[in-house]
Amino acid sequence: MTTTGKSTKQTKETPVRKAKPTKKQIMAAIEKTKSKAEEYVHDHEKAKKLLDDAVKKTKSFDKARGPLGEVWSYLTALFRLLKAYIQKDYRDIPWGSMVLVIVAIIYFVSPADLIPDILPGGYIDDAAVIAFVVSQIKVDLDNFMTWEVSRSDDDGTI
């Protein structure tokens, strides 16, 4: 075997685990989805279908594992908020916040996003978008969850 002075190191091809998307990538994904989300805010039948699809998708997850484990409770709170909004039980939320709730759910349901869901690490971007949305609407989401608890207290279901 002769060497020419150049590195002849061979690299094995291994599945690449994508890194967490940047804030710029997250913002671009959110902006891309906003107009679609606004349609869902207006069309409750469409929003119900989205919520059904999201709930079906969650049934296949081990909730405590992977990147979604860190945001799971927030994701399910977003589902409950959308359901309450559709049913007109809870409307004390700004328009922009409701649009962001739907953006996060659309992004979660969509298999083709920054990192396709079928790839290793494919839910890292979903978790990042959900976490970003939650950080933007934290006060509104906390108000909703307080409303939920007070409603449960009133019903005597605690």
Image (spheres, grey):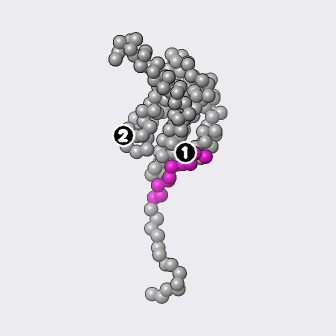
Q: Answer with left or right where residue 76 lies relative to residue 6.
A: left
Give how far apart the Cα atoms at labels 1 and 2 are.
Answer: 23 Å
Res 126 seen here? no
Q: Residue shown at 55%/45% (left/top)?
A: 113
Mark 1 closeness class: few <14, some 14–19, many ≥20 residues within 10 Å: few
**In the structure shown, which secondary structural element does the residue marked by tag 2 occupy?**
loop
Give the dominant element type of the magenta stretch: helix, strand or loop: loop
Q: Answer with left or right where residue 147 lies relative to residue 91.
A: left
| Residue 13 belongs to the span the image colors magenta | no
Res 91 seen here? yes
**In the structure shown, which secondary structural element does the residue marked by tag 1 occupy?**
loop
Q: Residue furthest bottom?
A: 2
Mark 2 closeness class: few <14, some 14–19, many ≥20 residues within 10 Å: few
The residue that label 2 is drawn on is 64
Q: Amino acid at mark 2?
A: Ala
Q: Residue shown at 50%/52% (left/top)?
A: 19
The residue that label 1 is drawn on is 112
Q: If you read the primary sequence from the N terminus, does the residue marked by circle 1 or circle 2 appear first?
A: 2
